Image: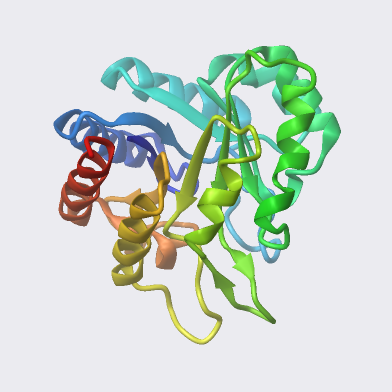
Amino acid sequence: MILICGPCVIDSLNDLRIDACEISAMADKYSLDLYFKASCIKDNRTNLKNYSGPGFTIGIQYLEEVKKQYGMKITTDFHTVEQIEVYANRVDLIQIPAFLAMQTSLINAAIKIGKPIHIKKPQWLPPYDVSNPVSKVKDQSKDIEVFMTDRGTTFGYGNVMVDPRHIKKMKTSDCDKVIVDITHPQNHSEIYSADYAEQLGMASIAAGADGLFIESTYNPMIAKCDGDSMIPTGQLYHYLNKFTKLYRFIKNG
């Protein structure tokens, strides 16, 4: 089972090391295909006062340090062609944010790097249309692996819902792996609860997802970005134990 997991944004090297240590240990315990994620830059902040990360020059160095220390694959968000051209050769998975999933220039730049590409499904894009960004990759290179993550679909104002039926439809789009984000879909009227993440994870795996996208840090209360939507790493063992048991049961028939 694929696990794309880590904090929303890099807060500091020390924080990143703590998260990487705990998450890599869980991935080893449950034999997961881990891509440790953390954004160097979060370019879609609500206002200028919100923390957006240390930047690519420092952030990539930090990610490479934890990759070397814990022997895991790394990924981060890319927002511009220039970022991809300069830094994408230093990660294992090129991640394109949901708001930019239809940007042909970004996809073309990522293809030139020759590494797997992870596209997050925009919340406004129906599942049967994910074939559009996927085909932009596959029409140019059949050999590049494409991950597509469902981050939910907008239902009215402020409501993002995950529909497990979308997984089957997305699997017909020629993407190689369908992942489901279980920590971001939320209702505008409530603070996100980790209880929903467990339910979304179990439902997604039961519906055929190849893996999960989970934002997690050791102490969400002190996180500089999106603490409300991150799961404490201390709770991940409980969730991953359930997720991996269900995943293997389904795969083994």
In the image, is residue 199 above or below residue 35? below
In the image, is residue 208 above or below residue 160? above
Q: Is residue 197 left or right of residue 125?
A: left
Quarter assignment of residue 18: top left
Judge by depth and name the residue closer to the eye, 178 or 67: 178
In the image, is residue 34 above or below residue 243? above
Q: Is residue 28 left or right of residue 12?
A: left
Residue at x-position 59% and y-position 46%: 170
Judge by depth and name the residue closer to the eye, 204 or 83: 204
Q: Is residue 213 left or right of residue 21?
A: right
Residue at x-position 26% and y-position 38%: 23
Residue 253, percent from left and from top: 23, 39
Judge by depth and name the residue closer to the eye, 112 or 52: 112
Residue at x-position 72% and y-position 62%: 124
Residue 113, percent from left and from top: 68, 13
Residue 77, percent from left and from top: 60, 38
Q: Is residue 34 left or right of residue 85?
A: left
Residue at the far right: name it.
Answer: 105
Query: Which part of the image, by quadrant, shows the N terminus?
Result: top left
Judge by depth and name the residue closer to the eye, 26 or 212: 212
In the image, is residue 210 above or below residue 116? below
